[in-house]
Amino acid sequence: MISTEKLSLSDRIMACDQNIVSDMGGEKVMLSIQNGNYYNLGSIGGTIWEMIGESTGIAELVDRLLGEYEVNRTECEQQVLDFLNHLRKEGLVLVNGEAASTNQA
């Protein structure tokens, strides 16, 4: 199954290409081809999703978000890590260049 090890700011993350993402009313929604689930990423989650289209350092991601939103660093770091950990648990992102998961039931 997917790794349960928590992400850190030193990790690099990238969106899996096994997802169909669309804009709906200013928010990003996604269908995972791998697991058949739908996800509403919201507007900020959608912004993060766009930023991780290519391998991106999580610390760099936080810095970019701090430049776009009024939030303190500690809160931003925690929210970003929580969001990315959820995406990782669902198999929607790759961490540190790992290969796409081939989960089988």
Image: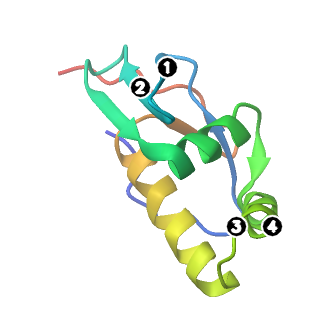
* Mark 4 → mark 1, Cα distance in angstroms: 25 Å
Mark 2: secondary structure = strand
Identify residue for label 3. Answer: 69
Instruction: Out of 68 and 49, give the one closest to the viewer.
Output: 68
Q: Position of residue 23 (x, y in %)?
A: 50, 24
Mark closer to the chain start, 4 or 3: 4
Q: Are marks 3 and 1 in contact (CB under 8 Å)?
A: no
Mark closer to the chain start, 4 or 2: 2
From this view, report whether residue 90 is shown above or below residue 73.
Answer: above
Instruction: Out of 14 and 5, give the one closest to the viewer.
Output: 14
Marking on residue 30: 2
Q: Residues within 10 Å of mark 2 (few under 14, many from 20)?
A: some
Q: Are marks 1 and 2 in contact (CB under 8 Å)?
A: yes
Mark 1: secondary structure = strand
Kindly identify the residue that appears in the image at 49 percent across and 16 percent down.
Answer: 18
* Mark 1 → mark 2, Cα distance in angstroms: 6 Å
Mark closer to the chain start, 2 or 3: 2
Residue 103's quadrant in the figure?
A: top left
From this view, report whether residue 51 is shown above or below residue 9.
Answer: above
Marking on residue 63: 4
Marking on residue 22: 1
Q: Amino acid at mark 3?
A: Tyr
Q: Position of residue 31 (x, y in %)?
A: 36, 20
Mark closer to the chain start, 3 or 1: 1
Q: Amino acid at mark 1?
A: Ser
Mark closer to the chain start, 4 or 1: 1
* Mark 2 → mark 3, Cα distance in angstroms: 23 Å
Q: Residues within 10 Å of mark 4 (few under 14, many from 20)?
A: some
Q: Are marks 2 and 3 in contact (CB under 8 Å)?
A: no
Q: Tell me, what colour scheme is on the image?
A: rainbow
Q: Amino acid at mark 4?
A: Asp
Q: Which quarter of the rendering shows the C terminus?
A: top left
